[in-house]
Amino acid sequence: MLIANVCPAYAICTSAITPDKRRETSRLLAMASPAGRTSTRYSKIPEFFIGPVKQPMPAVGLGTASHPFVAEDVRAAVLTALELGYRHIDTAALYASERVVGEAMAEALRRGIVASREELFVTSKVWCTQCHPELVLPSLKESLLSLQMEYIDLYLVHWPMAVKPTKPHFPMKREDIVPMDLSGVWQAMEECHRLGLAKMIGVSNFTTKKLQELLAIAKTPPAVNQVELNPTWQQKKLIEFCKDKGNHVAAYSPLGGQRISNMNPVRQSEVLEEIGKARGKSVAQISLRWIYEQGASMVVKSLKRERLKENIEIFDWELSNEDRFKISQLPQRKLITVQSLLCPEGVSRVDISDVDVVEM
């Protein structure tokens, strides 16, 4: 089953947050130095400086989409990652993890793992069911309530597609797809930014065509495009386009984690394994280092401390030109498609073929 940068709707958390608990968590998360971000002081993870004001974004972050969703596992993973030096936590309205992320960050502050909210970089996303101009801001406010935060660092349009308004869920009915008002949705995203509720705004799963459409109407261009990216889906055309337009690329599925059957083209790559053995590195480290050398940040997922640690031990060495050439010759295959988000039955009345354009 494809996870596809999403999380099943039935995993949505329903446990209540008491007003007292919300106030205490908000108080802890609000403690911040007016001098600005201090993450480089506490973490060895490098940062990319993105957007018009060059805001820092950690090169590696922790993803919190999981199936099945187990709140305690995700909470433990967030705390472990923060202990190891991670400062970017990636969540979404769909993942059911926003509440857990907020609670874990508050606990990290209480325990002194992080010194202030300003050390943290939090990403969330608006789902297709809320990709309507009048629902974007309310969706962000709901996310902030779940996170118990006053703002997030990055807010993304999860997919360039709109579905009839309802609670975020997956898979979605094909007959519920409606035309997306991209201009109206992006104006609402810009309002989120203007209000200071989102320090930066961006997109996810946008092709060059969709980015061109957006850039033609945007007053505030997207700072980030988060997409499937790894050595077996290299997105060369998209990366060059984004570099030219000043849009930072962030990778999800950097280790080929979205699986069809038992196949994982990254972890099962003989070429990457050969390079790793020659360098004394894991296949995961070779993949992540390759992504970093493309100028992209990445969101990795693991519940295991040793793997979380391994995933950030990629910054004090380089791939050789021979390594890079071998990786450039790997067969390419896109795993995450819009079709994976939809129920197999039913017929869409909206043409969504341009959402799934395969760009090499």
Image (tube, helix red, strand yellow):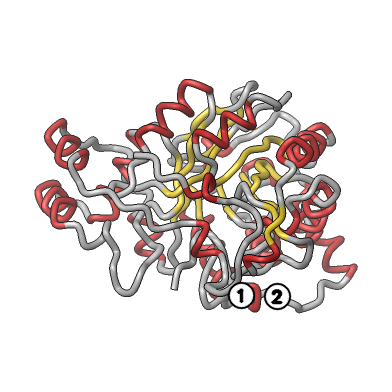
| Residue 320 image offset from top left, x and y in percent | 16, 34
Say which of 311 and 191 sits in front. Answer: 191
Helix, strand or loop under label 1? helix
Q: Name the kind of residue labelled 2 in the image.
A: Cys
- Work out which residue is located at the far right of the displayed protein and give it: 19
Q: Is residue 111 in view?
A: no
Give the residue at mark 1: 71
| Residue 6 image offset from top left, x and y in percent | 56, 63
| Residue 355 image offset from top left, x and y in percent | 54, 47
Q: CA distance from mark 1 to mark 2?
A: 8 Å
Q: Which numbered disc covers residue 13?
A: 2
- Quadrant, the C terminus: top left
> Is the residue marked by circle 2 packed among few (<14), some (14-19), or many (20+) residues within 10 Å?
some
> Is the residue marked by circle 1 packed among few (<14), some (14-19), or many (20+) residues within 10 Å?
some
98 relative to 240, above or below: below
Q: Earlier in the sequence, mark 1 or mark 2?
A: 2
Residues at badges 1 and 2 in contact (C-beta under 8 Å)? yes
Count of marks, rendered view: 2
Helix, strand or loop under label 2? loop
Q: In screen coordinates, is 332 left or right of 4?
A: left
149 relative to 348, above or below: above
346 relative to 355, above or below: below
Q: Is residue 7 in view?
A: yes
Q: Residue shown at 25%/61% (left/top)?
A: 267
Say which of 301 and 133 sits in front. Answer: 133
| Residue 206 image offset from top left, x and y in percent | 54, 42
Q: Residue shown at 53%/44% (left/top)?
A: 354
